[in-house]
Image: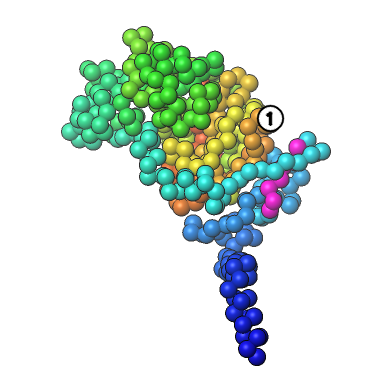
Amino acid sequence: MGQKHTNSNGLLKNPLFSFGLFAFVLLLAISFGNNSFANPSDLKNSDIVFFNDFFKDNNIKKDNPFFSKNEALYLETPDLKIVQDNSIYGISTPRVLTTQVLGAIFGESAQNSKDIIEYAVEPGDTLETIATDFNISLNTLLWANELSKNSQIKVGQKLVILPVSGVIYFVKSGDTLSEVGKVYKSKVQDIVAFNDLSNEGDIFIGDILVIPNGIMPQKAPVAVYQVPLASSFFIFPAEGTISQGLHFYNAIDASNKCGTPIYAAAPGEIQKVKYGYNFGGGNYVTILHSNGVVSYYGHLMTILVKPGDKVDVGERIAFMGGAPGMTGAGKSTGCHLHFQVMGAKNPLAKYGVGAVIKYSK
């Protein structure tokens, strides 16, 4: 009996046995504690999902918004995408427990200090007092809003506020950071660091950069050239309700349930796929269209594309996110799409807040 007692203690003290037991108990706790994997609409903001989110509409033969979307979307794993009906690739959609996601969650407060915001003028405000309150130079405020020192402001007027003194710059085709730095009197390494770029070449058409301590040249370049578009060029990027009218930068918000499909509003090439806080935009995708216009889709829960993918108009590219506390929500108060257009008029701008946008049957 003494020998058996000794072997039992040895087994319990074995680190491999202890780890295996802990992992088994943890798996049971996850399985029984979260009963909402099957239906994304049942997920609460506090739920943590340990699987990638890929949704499947079993009753739709084509991934196109002109087909009915009435059936429920269900969760499955792993994340795979069919390419041209003859091959597949995996989709990286980090949800929890990666350095990128953990950085986005715990580093959010630090990143808030880099956000470009809009401020509504209040009674008693002047351009000078607003600049002082936000600890930026008066010129920074004037440049960002295309104002002069003699400009009059009125209560309720929206003003763009940079996080530091400097200049806003909109990246165009052929731009290099070295040339941008020369024009605006700023160091390339400062631009890279402040905008969280991986390197000097990590810029794309339509990107919005803050040039820290930059100085506007006497002959200011045209910020963004507006390409005239046919009214049929864009389709709705998602179904939902317009929840916020035109705001920085040339963006409209459309709200719906988290998990609502997001579609390419026009054909083009996936230019950027970013995960994390991203200056408040959360997980986002940008598409470069043939005419040089760029469309931006922000606050995404799951992304189904990768840089370099060619997408058709109406192709499903992501699912709506933005619920407070959701990984990759960015600065958001609820499930919605932030749809932004660089280089052309936003097609959703003609709809007022509260308008419902949906596809024709």
Amino acid type, callout 1:
Lys
Element carrying mark 1: strand
Which residue is depicted at the point 27% across and 20% down? Answer: 139
Q: Is residue 278 magenta?
A: no
Q: Residue furthest right?
A: 86
Q: Report the quarter where the C terminus lies.
A: top right
Q: Is residue 47 visible?
A: yes
Of 305 and 124, nearer the camera is 305
Of 73 and 309, nearer the camera is 309
Which residue is depicted at the point 66% across and 29% down? Answer: 308
- Whether 82 is drawn above or below 247: the answer is below
Q: Residue furthest bottom?
A: 1
Q: Is residue 144 visible?
A: no
- Whether 106 is drawn above or below 230: the answer is below
Give the image quarter of residue 130: top left
Of 36 and 166, nearer the camera is 166
Residue at the spot of label 1: 310
The location of residue 353, given as percent across then percent down, is 44, 40
Q: Is residue 137 left or right of residue 260?
A: left
Which residue is depicted at the point 30% across and 23% down? Answer: 140
The location of residue 81, given as percent across then percent down, is 72, 42
Query: Magenta segment, which residues?
Result: 77-83
Q: Is residue 82 magenta?
A: yes
Q: Report the quarter where the N terminus lies.
A: bottom right
Give the image quarter of residue 185: top left
The location of residue 215, given as percent across then percent down, is 33, 17
Which residue is depicted at the point 30% across and 26% down? Answer: 165
Give the image quarter of residue 285: top right
- Whether 38 is drawn above or below 66: the answer is below
